[in-house]
Image (cartoon, rainbow, N blue to C red):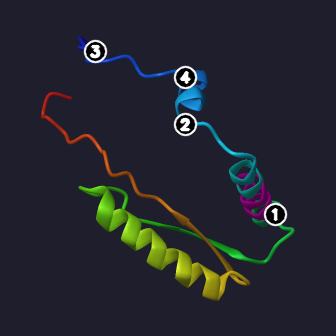
Amino acid sequence: MQMTFHRKLPIPQEVKKTFPVTEEMRQAKEKRDNEIRAVFEGKSDKFILVIGPCSADSSEPVLEYLSRLRRMEDQVSDKIIIIPRIYPNKPRTTGQG
């Protein structure tokens, strides 16, 4: 199989340098990870809802959608953990793969 590389993907350390995480963000992620882990380990009776759309064309509608989804999650957070799955830069198929 022949491939053409257009650009090298950054390694995780490069991404972390480009997009530093604050202590507040780190703590929020750790809390969320623990809540999700508790569901999978059977320590929580909450449901996990992974919801799309899995691709979008522009960032503005995605941000609006996420803000509405967040308000909804606040209303059901005692029963459901909502995990959005949205990628606004999804590459399209070219027919060569």
Distance from Cα at disc 2 to Cα at disc 4: 9 Å
The residue beneath circle 4 is: 14
The residue beneath circle 3 is: 5
- Verify CB contact (< 8 Å) between mark 4 and mark 3: no
Q: Which residues are magenta?
A: 29-38
Amino acid type, residue under disc 1 in the picture: Ala
In this view, the residue in front, 94 or 56, is 56
Location of the N terminus by quadrant is top left
Q: For mark 3, does the 10 Å Cα neighbourhood hold few (<14), some (14 to 19), or many (20 or more) residues?
A: few
The residue beneath circle 1 is: 38
- Per the image, label 3 sits on a secondary structure element best described as loop
Distance from Cα at disc 1 to Cα at disc 2: 28 Å
Dominant secondary structure (helix, strand or loop) of the stretch shown in magenta:
helix
Amino acid type, residue under disc 3 in the picture: Phe
Q: Position of residue 73 (x, y in %)?
A: 59, 79
Q: Earlier in the sequence, mark 1 or mark 4?
A: 4
Q: Earlier in the sequence, mark 1 or mark 2?
A: 2
- Verify CB contact (< 8 Å) between mark 2 and mark 4: no
Residue 40, placed above or below residue 77: above
Q: Residue at x 30, y 45 (%)?
A: 90
Q: Position of residue 84 (x, y in %)?
A: 50, 63
Q: Residue at x 21, y 29 (%)?
A: 97
Relative to residue 52, is residue 92 drawn left or right? left
Distance from Cα at disc 3 to Cα at disc 1: 40 Å
Q: Earlier in the sequence, mark 4 or mark 3?
A: 3
The residue beneath circle 2 is: 19
Q: Is residue 32 magenta-colored?
A: yes
Amino acid type, residue under disc 2 in the picture: Phe
Where on the picture, by quarter, is residue 13? Answer: top right
Q: Residue at x 77, y 64 (%)?
A: 35
Relative to residue 71, is residue 27 drawn left or right? right
Q: Is residue 83 magenta-colored?
A: no
